[in-house]
Image (cartoon, rainbow, N blue to C red):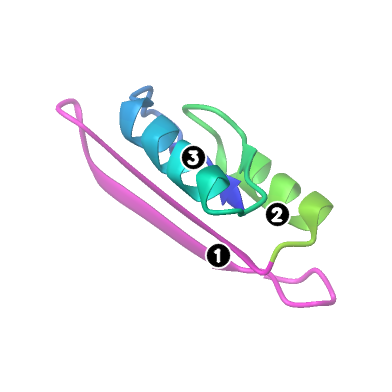
Amino acid sequence: MIIGTVDGDIHDIGKNLIDMLLKGSGFDVIDIGVSAPVAKLLKAARDAETEGVKAHGYSDSMASQELNVSIVPNGSI
């Protein structure tokens, strides 16, 4: 599983809590950090051969952003 906050969002408390909960439940989690560009999310998903990425971010200075990406076996989006 890939975890990170979207480009422009540097808030990581919620991300870190979810990361700990997932790892504690036995999931393999790759944390790509905060303010991650879409290209970084996609590269991490392809490198880890994961089936998808869900990233969400919100701050006072930007509208809520949500990214849902499905990576199919041949690497296309």
- Of 66 and 31, which appears nearest the observer? 31
Q: Label 2 sits on what residue type?
A: Ala
- Of 54 and 24, which appears nearest the observer? 24
> Mark 2 = which residue?
45
Q: Label 1 sits on what residue type?
A: Val
Q: Earlier in the sequence, mark 1 or mark 3?
A: 3
Please tell me how crowded label 1 is: few (under 14), some (14-19), or many (20+) other residues with Cα within 10 Å.
Answer: some
Q: Position of residue 52 (x, y in %)?
A: 61, 65
Q: Position of residue 19 (x, y in %)?
A: 49, 40
Question: Cα distance, mark 1 to mark 3?
Answer: 19 Å
Q: Secondary structure at mark 1?
A: strand
Please tell me how crowded label 2 is: few (under 14), some (14-19), or many (20+) other residues with Cα within 10 Å.
Answer: many
Q: Quadrant of the C terminus?
A: bottom right
Residue 54 falls inside the magenta stretch: yes
Question: Cα distance, mark 2 to mark 1?
Answer: 9 Å
Residue 70's quadrant in the figure? bottom right
Residue 74 falls inside the magenta stretch: yes
Mark 2–mark 1 CB contact (< 8 Å)? yes
Q: Residue furthest bottom?
A: 73
